[in-house]
Image: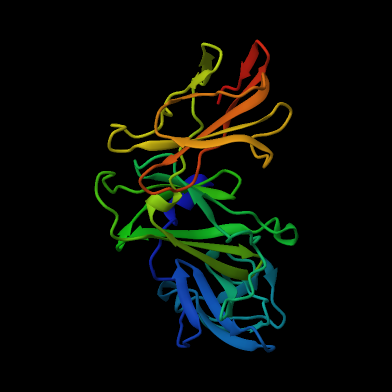
Amino acid sequence: MRALFLMVLYAGLCYASAVTDKDNVEILMDNVLVLRVPDDQSTREYVQLSCGEAYENQPVVWKKNGEELEPALQGNQVKVLVEEMNGGNYTCHRGPDGEYLNHTVILVQLDPDNRTVILEEKDGHIHCSAPNYKGSFHCTWKRTRSRSNAAVLLVKAERNSEKISCELDADGSGILCQDASCPYREEQHQISLTIYIHSDSRLEAYTKAFYLREIVKPDALPNLHISNGKVFSWSYPDSWERPCTYFGLQFQVKVVQKGLSCHSDALILLAMTQETKYEVNIKSNKYVFCVRAQDKHTSGPFSHWSHCTVDKNKVDCNKP
Protein backbone atom coordinates (compact mmCIF):
# COMPACT_ATOMS: atom_id res chain seq x y z
CA MET A 1 0.00 0.00 0.00
CA ARG A 2 2.79 2.41 0.91
CA ALA A 3 4.63 1.69 -2.33
CA LEU A 4 1.44 2.48 -4.26
CA PHE A 5 1.05 5.71 -2.33
CA LEU A 6 4.57 6.77 -3.11
CA MET A 7 3.85 6.38 -6.81
CA VAL A 8 1.04 8.95 -6.61
CA LEU A 9 2.41 11.12 -3.86
CA TYR A 10 2.90 14.07 -6.14
CA ALA A 11 1.09 13.56 -9.42
CA GLY A 12 0.56 16.39 -11.83
CA LEU A 13 -2.46 16.84 -14.06
CA CYS A 14 -1.95 13.57 -15.89
CA TYR A 15 -4.00 11.75 -18.53
CA ALA A 16 -7.01 9.95 -17.09
CA SER A 17 -9.71 7.91 -18.79
CA ALA A 18 -12.08 10.84 -18.90
CA VAL A 19 -13.16 13.66 -21.15
CA THR A 20 -13.62 17.03 -19.44
CA ASP A 21 -15.19 20.03 -21.09
CA LYS A 22 -16.49 21.80 -18.01
CA ASP A 23 -14.74 24.37 -15.86
CA ASN A 24 -15.93 22.62 -12.70
CA VAL A 25 -14.35 19.26 -13.59
CA GLU A 26 -10.62 18.71 -13.06
CA ILE A 27 -8.34 15.74 -13.67
CA LEU A 28 -6.57 15.57 -10.32
CA MET A 29 -4.39 12.55 -11.13
CA ASP A 30 -4.50 9.39 -13.23
CA ASN A 31 -8.05 7.98 -13.25
CA VAL A 32 -9.36 10.51 -10.70
CA LEU A 33 -11.78 13.31 -11.59
CA VAL A 34 -12.88 16.05 -9.21
CA LEU A 35 -16.30 17.60 -9.69
CA ARG A 36 -16.68 20.92 -7.90
CA VAL A 37 -20.22 21.84 -6.89
CA PRO A 38 -21.74 24.83 -5.05
CA ASP A 39 -22.08 24.27 -1.32
CA ASP A 40 -25.34 26.18 -1.01
CA GLN A 41 -27.66 24.32 -3.37
CA SER A 42 -28.68 20.88 -4.59
CA THR A 43 -26.81 19.75 -7.68
CA ARG A 44 -27.26 17.28 -10.57
CA GLU A 45 -24.27 17.25 -12.92
CA TYR A 46 -23.45 15.09 -15.94
CA VAL A 47 -19.81 14.04 -16.27
CA GLN A 48 -18.44 12.55 -19.47
CA LEU A 49 -16.23 9.46 -19.17
CA SER A 50 -14.12 7.52 -21.66
CA CYS A 51 -12.91 3.96 -21.32
CA GLY A 52 -9.92 4.85 -23.52
CA GLU A 53 -8.98 5.16 -27.16
CA ALA A 54 -7.81 1.54 -27.30
CA TYR A 55 -11.39 0.35 -26.70
CA GLU A 56 -13.15 2.64 -29.20
CA ASN A 57 -14.69 -0.23 -31.17
CA GLN A 58 -15.16 -2.65 -28.27
CA PRO A 59 -18.51 -3.65 -26.67
CA VAL A 60 -17.90 -1.63 -23.50
CA VAL A 61 -20.19 -1.92 -20.47
CA TRP A 62 -19.89 0.28 -17.36
CA LYS A 63 -20.33 -0.51 -13.68
CA LYS A 64 -20.42 1.76 -10.63
CA ASN A 65 -18.67 0.60 -7.45
CA GLY A 66 -18.71 -2.93 -8.86
CA GLU A 67 -22.46 -2.99 -9.50
CA GLU A 68 -24.20 -3.06 -12.88
CA LEU A 69 -26.14 0.09 -13.70
CA GLU A 70 -29.88 0.23 -14.41
CA PRO A 71 -30.51 0.94 -17.18
CA ALA A 72 -27.27 -0.50 -18.58
CA LEU A 73 -24.60 2.01 -19.52
CA GLN A 74 -22.80 1.03 -22.71
CA GLY A 75 -20.25 2.57 -25.04
CA ASN A 76 -16.68 3.75 -24.93
CA GLN A 77 -17.72 7.34 -24.15
CA VAL A 78 -20.64 7.90 -21.81
CA LYS A 79 -22.18 10.54 -19.57
CA VAL A 80 -22.96 9.70 -15.95
CA LEU A 81 -25.23 11.66 -13.64
CA VAL A 82 -23.69 12.77 -10.33
CA GLU A 83 -26.26 13.91 -7.80
CA GLU A 84 -25.20 15.84 -4.70
CA MET A 85 -22.02 14.19 -3.28
CA ASN A 86 -22.75 10.83 -4.90
CA GLY A 87 -19.67 10.16 -7.02
CA GLY A 88 -18.05 6.74 -7.19
CA ASN A 89 -15.71 4.35 -9.00
CA TYR A 90 -16.83 3.77 -12.59
CA THR A 91 -15.26 0.73 -14.25
CA CYS A 92 -15.55 -0.26 -17.88
CA HIS A 93 -15.58 -3.90 -19.02
CA ARG A 94 -15.52 -5.86 -22.27
CA GLY A 95 -19.19 -6.86 -22.28
CA PRO A 96 -21.52 -7.41 -19.27
CA ASP A 97 -19.42 -10.20 -17.79
CA GLY A 98 -16.18 -9.37 -19.56
CA GLU A 99 -12.75 -8.41 -18.37
CA TYR A 100 -11.96 -5.16 -16.62
CA LEU A 101 -10.57 -2.54 -19.00
CA ASN A 102 -10.23 0.77 -17.18
CA HIS A 103 -11.75 2.95 -14.48
CA THR A 104 -12.39 6.52 -13.39
CA VAL A 105 -13.07 7.63 -9.84
CA ILE A 106 -15.34 10.67 -9.53
CA LEU A 107 -14.91 12.64 -6.32
CA VAL A 108 -16.98 15.67 -5.34
CA GLN A 109 -15.57 18.79 -3.74
CA LEU A 110 -17.58 21.73 -2.44
CA ASP A 111 -16.76 25.05 -4.10
CA PRO A 112 -15.71 27.20 -2.40
CA ASP A 113 -14.29 24.51 -0.14
CA ASN A 114 -15.11 26.14 3.20
CA ARG A 115 -17.18 23.40 4.82
CA THR A 116 -14.49 21.01 5.99
CA VAL A 117 -15.82 18.04 7.96
CA ILE A 118 -13.16 15.35 7.50
CA LEU A 119 -10.34 16.70 9.70
CA GLU A 120 -10.58 18.22 13.16
CA GLU A 121 -9.74 21.88 13.53
CA LYS A 122 -7.54 22.72 16.50
CA ASP A 123 -5.26 25.69 15.85
CA GLY A 124 -5.37 24.60 12.21
CA HIS A 125 -6.02 21.24 10.57
CA ILE A 126 -2.39 20.24 9.85
CA HIS A 127 0.38 20.40 12.46
CA CYS A 128 4.04 20.18 11.45
CA SER A 129 7.30 19.99 13.38
CA ALA A 130 10.98 19.35 12.71
CA PRO A 131 13.69 18.34 15.22
CA ASN A 132 16.41 20.37 13.44
CA TYR A 133 17.31 22.14 10.19
CA LYS A 134 18.41 19.07 8.23
CA GLY A 135 15.22 19.26 6.15
CA SER A 136 13.18 16.41 7.59
CA PHE A 137 9.77 17.37 8.95
CA HIS A 138 6.67 15.52 10.10
CA CYS A 139 3.07 16.69 9.71
CA THR A 140 0.01 15.18 11.36
CA TRP A 141 -3.77 15.58 11.32
CA LYS A 142 -6.73 14.01 13.08
CA ARG A 143 -9.90 12.77 11.42
CA THR A 144 -13.26 13.67 12.92
CA ARG A 145 -15.08 10.84 14.63
CA SER A 146 -17.75 10.66 11.91
CA ARG A 147 -15.06 10.44 9.18
CA SER A 148 -12.60 8.08 10.86
CA ASN A 149 -12.28 5.96 7.70
CA ALA A 150 -11.27 8.87 5.47
CA ALA A 151 -8.20 8.14 3.35
CA VAL A 152 -5.42 10.31 1.96
CA LEU A 153 -5.52 10.36 -1.83
CA LEU A 154 -2.66 12.67 -2.70
CA VAL A 155 -0.02 14.87 -1.08
CA LYS A 156 1.66 17.81 -2.82
CA ALA A 157 4.66 19.37 -1.11
CA GLU A 158 7.03 21.88 -2.66
CA ARG A 159 9.25 24.89 -2.04
CA ASN A 160 9.69 27.49 -4.77
CA SER A 161 8.29 25.02 -7.36
CA GLU A 162 10.76 22.30 -6.29
CA LYS A 163 9.02 19.10 -5.23
CA ILE A 164 9.57 17.71 -1.75
CA SER A 165 9.35 13.94 -1.28
CA CYS A 166 6.97 12.67 1.41
CA GLU A 167 5.96 9.29 2.77
CA LEU A 168 2.58 8.54 4.34
CA ASP A 169 2.48 7.23 7.91
CA ALA A 170 1.18 3.69 8.26
CA ASP A 171 -2.04 4.85 9.95
CA GLY A 172 -2.72 7.55 7.35
CA SER A 173 -2.66 10.32 9.95
CA GLY A 174 0.60 11.98 8.99
CA ILE A 175 3.48 12.28 6.56
CA LEU A 176 7.26 12.37 6.84
CA CYS A 177 8.90 14.69 4.31
CA GLN A 178 12.48 15.51 3.35
CA ASP A 179 13.37 18.97 2.05
CA ALA A 180 16.71 18.99 0.24
CA SER A 181 17.45 22.64 1.07
CA CYS A 182 20.80 23.45 2.68
CA PRO A 183 20.35 24.09 6.43
CA TYR A 184 22.92 26.94 6.30
CA ARG A 185 20.99 28.82 3.62
CA GLU A 186 18.52 31.51 4.65
CA GLU A 187 14.95 30.49 3.86
CA GLN A 188 13.51 32.81 1.24
CA HIS A 189 10.50 30.71 0.25
CA GLN A 190 7.89 28.89 2.29
CA ILE A 191 7.14 25.20 2.08
CA SER A 192 3.70 24.67 0.55
CA LEU A 193 1.75 21.57 1.55
CA THR A 194 -1.61 20.30 0.27
CA ILE A 195 -3.34 17.18 1.55
CA TYR A 196 -6.17 15.69 -0.54
CA ILE A 197 -8.28 13.40 1.62
CA HIS A 198 -11.60 11.73 0.81
CA SER A 199 -14.43 10.15 2.72
CA ASP A 200 -16.50 8.01 0.34
CA SER A 201 -16.95 10.38 -2.64
CA ARG A 202 -16.39 13.59 -0.71
CA LEU A 203 -13.00 15.20 -1.33
CA GLU A 204 -11.44 17.93 0.79
CA ALA A 205 -8.14 19.70 0.24
CA TYR A 206 -6.21 21.07 3.21
CA THR A 207 -3.32 23.46 2.72
CA LYS A 208 -0.53 24.77 4.91
CA ALA A 209 2.40 27.09 4.18
CA PHE A 210 5.35 27.58 6.52
CA TYR A 211 9.05 28.18 6.87
CA LEU A 212 11.11 25.41 8.41
CA ARG A 213 12.32 27.87 11.04
CA GLU A 214 8.73 28.28 12.23
CA ILE A 215 8.26 24.59 13.02
CA VAL A 216 11.69 23.53 14.31
CA LYS A 217 11.10 22.06 17.76
CA PRO A 218 14.17 20.62 19.51
CA ASP A 219 13.96 17.17 21.03
CA ALA A 220 13.82 16.90 24.81
CA LEU A 221 17.11 17.68 26.53
CA PRO A 222 19.15 14.59 27.50
CA ASN A 223 21.60 13.89 30.34
CA LEU A 224 19.80 16.05 32.90
CA HIS A 225 21.41 15.59 36.31
CA ILE A 226 22.35 17.44 39.48
CA SER A 227 25.73 18.07 41.09
CA ASN A 228 26.76 19.76 44.33
CA GLY A 229 23.17 19.47 45.50
CA LYS A 230 21.87 22.44 43.53
CA VAL A 231 23.53 22.75 40.07
CA PHE A 232 21.53 21.14 37.28
CA SER A 233 23.14 20.47 33.91
CA TRP A 234 22.05 18.93 30.61
CA SER A 235 23.19 18.41 27.01
CA TYR A 236 22.08 19.52 23.56
CA PRO A 237 19.82 16.90 21.90
CA ASP A 238 21.72 14.39 19.78
CA SER A 239 19.42 15.26 16.87
CA TRP A 240 20.28 18.97 17.00
CA GLU A 241 22.36 20.35 14.16
CA ARG A 242 26.03 21.19 14.72
CA PRO A 243 27.92 23.43 15.26
CA CYS A 244 25.99 24.71 18.26
CA THR A 245 27.52 28.16 17.79
CA TYR A 246 25.60 28.47 14.53
CA PHE A 247 22.46 26.59 15.59
CA GLY A 248 22.31 27.91 19.14
CA LEU A 249 19.65 27.02 21.70
CA GLN A 250 18.34 28.92 24.68
CA PHE A 251 16.79 27.24 27.68
CA GLN A 252 13.85 27.99 29.92
CA VAL A 253 14.19 26.70 33.46
CA LYS A 254 11.29 26.40 35.84
CA VAL A 255 10.88 25.24 39.44
CA VAL A 256 7.51 24.15 40.84
CA GLN A 257 6.42 22.49 44.06
CA LYS A 258 6.91 18.74 44.38
CA GLY A 259 3.87 16.90 43.07
CA LEU A 260 3.11 19.46 40.36
CA SER A 261 3.85 19.07 36.65
CA CYS A 262 6.15 21.26 34.60
CA HIS A 263 3.06 22.76 32.97
CA SER A 264 1.83 24.18 36.28
CA ASP A 265 1.47 27.95 36.63
CA ALA A 266 2.26 27.73 40.37
CA LEU A 267 5.86 28.87 39.97
CA ILE A 268 8.67 29.05 42.46
CA LEU A 269 11.19 30.15 39.83
CA LEU A 270 11.22 30.92 36.10
CA ALA A 271 14.28 32.00 34.12
CA MET A 272 16.04 31.87 30.74
CA THR A 273 19.66 30.93 30.13
CA GLN A 274 21.95 30.10 27.21
CA GLU A 275 24.15 27.91 29.38
CA THR A 276 23.64 24.16 29.69
CA LYS A 277 23.54 24.40 33.47
CA TYR A 278 21.62 26.30 36.13
CA GLU A 279 22.13 26.74 39.87
CA VAL A 280 18.96 26.62 41.97
CA ASN A 281 19.06 28.74 45.13
CA ILE A 282 15.76 28.29 46.95
CA LYS A 283 14.84 27.41 50.53
CA SER A 284 12.67 24.42 49.72
CA ASN A 285 14.32 21.00 49.49
CA LYS A 286 11.27 19.42 47.84
CA TYR A 287 10.57 20.63 44.32
CA VAL A 288 10.56 19.78 40.61
CA PHE A 289 13.23 21.29 38.34
CA CYS A 290 12.14 21.64 34.70
CA VAL A 291 14.06 22.69 31.61
CA ARG A 292 13.22 22.96 27.91
CA ALA A 293 14.91 24.38 24.80
CA GLN A 294 14.12 26.56 21.80
CA ASP A 295 16.09 28.01 18.90
CA LYS A 296 17.52 31.24 20.30
CA HIS A 297 17.56 32.91 16.88
CA THR A 298 13.92 32.30 15.93
CA SER A 299 12.23 31.89 19.33
CA GLY A 300 10.24 29.06 17.77
CA PRO A 301 8.48 26.14 19.49
CA PHE A 302 9.86 24.86 22.79
CA SER A 303 10.92 21.26 23.25
CA HIS A 304 9.08 19.02 25.68
CA TRP A 305 10.08 19.48 29.31
CA SER A 306 12.85 17.45 30.91
CA HIS A 307 12.64 17.38 34.69
CA CYS A 308 14.11 16.20 37.96
CA THR A 309 12.11 15.62 41.14
CA VAL A 310 14.01 16.63 44.28
CA ASP A 311 12.91 15.17 47.63
CA LYS A 312 15.50 16.31 50.17
CA ASN A 313 18.60 14.26 49.32
CA LYS A 314 16.85 12.05 46.78
CA VAL A 315 16.79 13.18 43.13
CA ASP A 316 14.98 11.39 40.31
CA CYS A 317 15.55 12.71 36.77
CA ASN A 318 13.55 11.60 33.74
CA LYS A 319 15.35 10.22 30.71
CA PRO A 320 13.95 11.33 27.32
Q: Is residue 55 above or below residue 189?
A: below
Residue in front for this viewpoint, 95 or 178: 178
Instruction: Give how far across and how far down residue 62 sits, in percent.
Output: 60, 74
Q: In the image shown, does 152 or 103 lie closer to the viewer?
A: 152
Q: In the image, residue 138 lies at what x, y percent?
A: 48, 46
Residue depicted at 51% across the width and 36% down the height: 271
At 43% from the left and 29% from the top, the residue drawn is 237
Res 136 quadrant in image? top left
Residue 23 spot, x, y in % from top left: 46, 87
Q: Quadrant of the C terminus?
A: top right
Q: Is residue 248 left or right of residue 58?
A: left
Can residue 17 be seen at all in this image of the molecule?
Answer: no
Quarter of the rendering containing residue 229: top right
> Foreground: 116 or 245?
245
Above or below for 155 versus 273: below
The residue positioned 38% from the left and 49% from the top of the image is 298
Q: Tell me what residue is drawn at x 38 percent, y 51 percent.
A: 212
Of all residues, the one furthest to the front in this rendering is 283
